[in-house]
Image: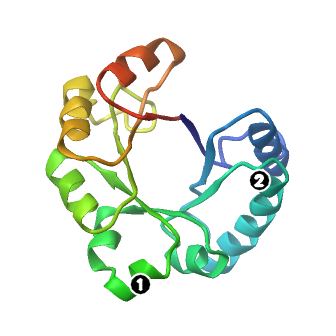
C-alpha cells in the first residue's frame, strides 16, 4: 500500500491538479499534511481535495486537524501528543485514527488508544530531517512486531527499498 503525503510548498505546478494525478494514478490513500494552514484554510483545502478523491474512489486522510476530520467524517493521522489527549468521546467521533510513532513503546500505546494504523519513521535518511539519523529497518521491524495493526514506513522511501520495508513487516509506505 502506498500513501501519498502532501506538501504543497514542494509541489511543482498546481496543487489540486497534482492531487487529481495522484488520485487517478492509483494512490492507495492521500494524506493531506499541510500543517502550516489555519483551521479554516485547512478545512477549505480538505473539501477541495475530498471532491477530487471521491471522484477517483481514493481515500483522503487528514493530518492533525481532528476537528476538520470529525466534521467531514474522514480518517485522521495524529501525532502522539494529540492522540494522548483525546477523550473516548472525541475518539468515537472520528471514523478512523492513525498515529505517528517513533518507538515500539509509542506503537503499543497508540494501538491501546484506538489507532487503526501507524506511520513509523523516519526509516532511511531524508532531506526532510537532515540533522536526525534514520531509525532504520530494525526499528521498523520492532515496531511492526509490537502491534497487530498496519504499520506504514516513512522517510527516504524509494522503489528499491520497498522489498526491505515489507520484509520488515510493514503494510506499505508513505511517500
- The residue sitting at 60% across, 77% down in the picture is 68
* Left or right of 12 in this view: 95: left
| Closer to the camera in the image, 19 or 88 | 88
Whole-angstrom CA distance, mark 1 to mark 2, is 25 Å
Whole-percent x, y for residue 54 in the image: 79, 57
- The residue sitting at 27% across, 69% down in the picture is 113
| Extreme residue toward the front, this view | 148
Whole-percent x, y for residue 41 in the image: 70, 73
**Mark found first going from the N terminus, 1 or 2:** 2
Residue 90: assigned label: 1
State if disc 2 and disc 1 touch (CB < 8 Å).
Answer: no
The answer, for residue 160, to whether it is visible in the render is: yes
Name the residue tied to disc 2: 53
* Left or right of 115 in this view: 39: right
- Picture layout, residue 51 above or below residue 133: below
Instruction: Give the secondary structure at mark 1.
Output: helix
Instruction: Give the secondary structure at mark 2.
Output: helix
| Closer to the camera in the image, 110 or 14 | 110
Whole-percent x, y for residue 10 in the image: 65, 41
- The residue sitting at 81% across, 51% down in the picture is 16
Amino acid at each position: 500500500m502506498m500513501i501519498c503525503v502532501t506538501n504543497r510548498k514542494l509541489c511543482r505546478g498546481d496543487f489540486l491538479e497534482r492531487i487529481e494525478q495522484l488520485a487517478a494514478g492509483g494512490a492507495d490513500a492521500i494524506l493531506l499534511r499541510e500543517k502550516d494552514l489555519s483551521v479554516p484554510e485547512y478545512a477549505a483545502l480538505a473539501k477541495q481535495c475530498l471532491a477530487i478523491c471521491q471522484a477517483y474512489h481514493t481515500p483522503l486522510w487528514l493530518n492533525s486537524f481532528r476537528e476538520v476530520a470529525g466534521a467531514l467524517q474522514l480518517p485522521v493521522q495524529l501525532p502522539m501528543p494529540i492522540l494522548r489527549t483525546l477523550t473516548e468521546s472525541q475518539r468515537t467521533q472520528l471514523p478512523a485514527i492513525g498515529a505517528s510513532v517513533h518507538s515500539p513503546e509509542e506503537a503499543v500505546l497508540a494501538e491501546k488508544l484506538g489507532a487503526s494504523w501507524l506511520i513509523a519513521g523516519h526509516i532511511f535518511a531524508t532531506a526532510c530531517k537532515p540533522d536526525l539519523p534514520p531509525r532504520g529497518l530494525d526499528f521498523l521491524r520492532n515496531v511492526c512486531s509490537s502491534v497487530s495493526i498496519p504499520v506504514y514506513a516513512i522517510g527516504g522511501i524509494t522503489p528499491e527499498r520497498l522489498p526491505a520495508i515489507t520484509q520488515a513487516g510493514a503494510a506499505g509506505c508513505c511517500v
